[in-house]
Structures are given as structure tokens and as C-alpha cells.
Image: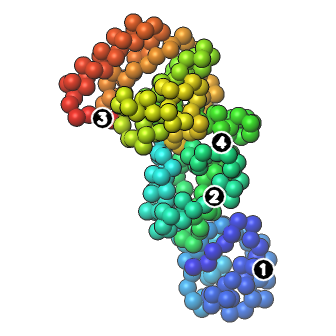
């Protein structure tokens, strides 16, 4: 297996080929690269011992010889779940990912954690890549996404925090922007967000419903206890959630309630009375679907 790093030059690659026993002569191999004006894909390539130089260089131009670990990180996963998926795909211990520090990834040490800063997408990683390099790729991809939306560095934590809540609370694609408006409207009037998703995150829970005790816990993620946004993101927000955080729908809503957890149907309300009717719909649905906890 030959690992080609991004930006690596032909002379280095030729030396590696000789050292691995793939080709015999450095000078001949390097001259052949120059003659071909050969470009290189970063990644890990599967080669054979004692190959003809031309055959080895042909393989380095053919992506079917790339050896990769394919992994899809879904929107809304928590950082621990992301580490689980990366560990399963790469064979690296989860502890390797947990050991990487914010400073190593170029992120402020003041962040509560890496939560929310790993962009959810499908990735192909080489077989010899480190946990730090994998996480750096994902952080860089999130930065690219934020750059595409024009989000300045000073606003990134705020945007990702709101986007992560929208990602967990919105169920249907078109509702992302309405959920964003509900939270934005509440923030404008200093009304507590009262997001059960943040409560569940702060208590280590995994369901859409929370207990009275969880809603009264003073941890920094509890938006029933504390006004404003929580201290940090609660999940990995995707592009749509980020877009919704930045561009909420127009509307007066202050409440929303999922009235069918299977279909995702959600009712948006402006008054307490309207919201109470929606909550009654949700309770009726829960009675008809015992054992459902989201």
C-alpha cells in the first residue's frame, strides 16, 4: 500500500515506490513521471511488488486501485455517535478520536467540546490515516460550509448551536425554516427556548420526551432553566439546518409541537391556546401508540 499525501511531489512518490519494492530504479521512475506529466490523487493505493514502472504509474492514475474506508455520517448524530461510526469504518479505536484535542484541530479551547463542528457527509478515508487527520478533514469541511454561507468566525459557535437544535427538533424538511423562526422569535423577546432536545442532550438522554427532573437540572444545555442558546451545539448540523438557522421562514410562531412522531407532522402556533390544542393532539397520539419514545 502506497500512501500519497495531498500536495506530495513526484520525487517523493518515486522514492516511496522504490522503498516499498514496487519498482527498482528511482531515476527511471521519476523521469517517466516527468515524461507523462503525471498528476497524483491523494490516498492509499494498492500495488504489487516488483512491478514494471509503467504498470505502477498506470495504477496511480486509476482510482479503482484506491484503498478507502467509506463512511457516512448522518445529520443529527452526537459526537460520540460520530466517533462510533468512524471507529467502525476505519478500525481505529474510539479512544483515538476521543484523545484528539480542540487545539490540535485549530478550534478554540473555550468550546465545551467538538460537538457540532464535524460536518455530516460521506467520506472516503485511506487505510493508514490517523484519527486526528480524519477529524481535521471533517472540521475543515464544516469550515468550508460555513464559508459558503458567509458566516464570520465570531458567529460560528452561535450559528452551529442554533443549527444543531433545529437539526434535532425539525422532522420534515420544510419545517426546518419554521422551527428556526420559532426559536428566533423567542430569542428576540427573551423567551426561554424550552427545547426538549437540549434538555435530553444535557442529561445524556436519547428520547424526545423529558422528565420534570431533567427539565429542572441547571446544566448549561437546559433551555428550560437558562435563557438564550445553550452553551454549545447538541448534534452535527447539516447544510439545511445551517441554512435554516441563517434564513428562518417569515412567521409569528412561538410554539411548535410534533403531533405524529411517525410521520413528523408538526403544528406551529402563535398563542398558548393554539399550542395547548396541539399538545392535546400529541398526547392523544402517544396514547394510541404506547411505548413510542422517539
Which residue is the site of mark 3?
293
Say which of 41 and 177 sits in front.
177
Which residue is the site of mark 2?
101
**Residue shown at the point (70%, 65%) measured from the top left:** 6
Q: Give the x, y percent position of residue 182.
A: 53, 19
206 left or right of 168 in image: left
Pointer 3 local density, CA inside 10 Å: few below 14, some 14–19, many at least 20: few
In space, the residues marked 4 and 3 are separated at their CA atoms by: 33 Å
Q: Nearer the viewer, mark 4 or mark 3?
A: 3
In space, the residues marked 4 and 2 are separated at their CA atoms by: 22 Å
Which residue is the site of mark 1?
11
Q: Is residue 163 visible?
A: no
**Residue shown at the point (51%, 13%) measured from the top left:** 253
Q: Which image quarter is the C terminus in?
A: top left
Which residue is the site of mark 4?
145
In space, the residues marked 2 and 3 are separated at their CA atoms by: 34 Å
Q: Reading the chain from its start, which is encountered first: label 2 or label 1?
A: 1
Q: Nearer the viewer, mark 2 or mark 3?
A: 2
Q: Give the x, y percent position of residue 3.
A: 63, 74
Quadrant assignment, res 188? top right
Amino acid at each position: 500500500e502506497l500512501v500519497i499525501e495531498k500536495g506530495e511531489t513526484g520525487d517523493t512518490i518515486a522514492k516511496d515506490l522504490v522503498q516499498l519494492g514496487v519498482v527498482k530504479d528511482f531515476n527511471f521512475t521519476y523521469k517517466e513521471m516527468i515524461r507523462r506529466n503525471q498528476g497524483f490523487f491523494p490516498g492509499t493505493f494498492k500495488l504489487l511488488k516488483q512491478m514494471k514502472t509503467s504498470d505502477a504509474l498506470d495504477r496511480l492514475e486509476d482510482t479503482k486501485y484506491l484503498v478507502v474506508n467509506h463512511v457516512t455520517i448522518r445529520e443529527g448524530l452526537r459526537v460520540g455517535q460520530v466517533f462510533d461510526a468512524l471507529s467502525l469504518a476505519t478500525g481505529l479505536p474510539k479512544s483515538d478520536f476521543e484523545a484528539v484535542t480542540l487545539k490540535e484541530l485549530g478550534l478554540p479551547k473555550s468550546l465545551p467540546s467538538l460537538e457540532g463542528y464535524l460536518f455530516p457527509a460521506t467520506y472516503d478515508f485511506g487505510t493508514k490515516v490517523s484519527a486526528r487527520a480524519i477529524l481535521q478533514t471533517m472540521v475543515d469541511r464544516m469550515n468550508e460550509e460555513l464559508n459558503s454561507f458567509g458566516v464570520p468566525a465570531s458567529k460560528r459557535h452561535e450559528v452551529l448551536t442554533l443549527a444543531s437544535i433545529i437539526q434535532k427538533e425539525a422532522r420534515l424538511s420544510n419545517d426546518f425554516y419554521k422551527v428556526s423562526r420559532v426559536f428566533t422569535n423567542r430569542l428576540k423577546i427573551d423567551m426561554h427556548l424550552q427545547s426538549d432536545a437540549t434538555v435530553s442532550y444535557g442529561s445524556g438522554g436519547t428520547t424526545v420526551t423529558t422528565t420534570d427532573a431533567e427539565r429542572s437540572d441547571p446544566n448549561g444545555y437546559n433551555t428550560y432553566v437558562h435563557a438564550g442558546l445553550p452553551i454549545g451545539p447538541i448534534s452535527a448540523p447539516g447544510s439545511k439546518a445551517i441554512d435554516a438557522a441563517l434564513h428562518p421562514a417569515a412567521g409569528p410562531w412561538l410554539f411548535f409541537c410534533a403531533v405524529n412522531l411517525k410521520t413528523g407532522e408538526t403544528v406551529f402556533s402563535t398563542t398558548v391556546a393554539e399550542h395547548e390544542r396541539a399538545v392535546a393532539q400529541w398526547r392523544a397520539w402517544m396514547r394510541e401508540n404506547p411505548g413510542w419514545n422517539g
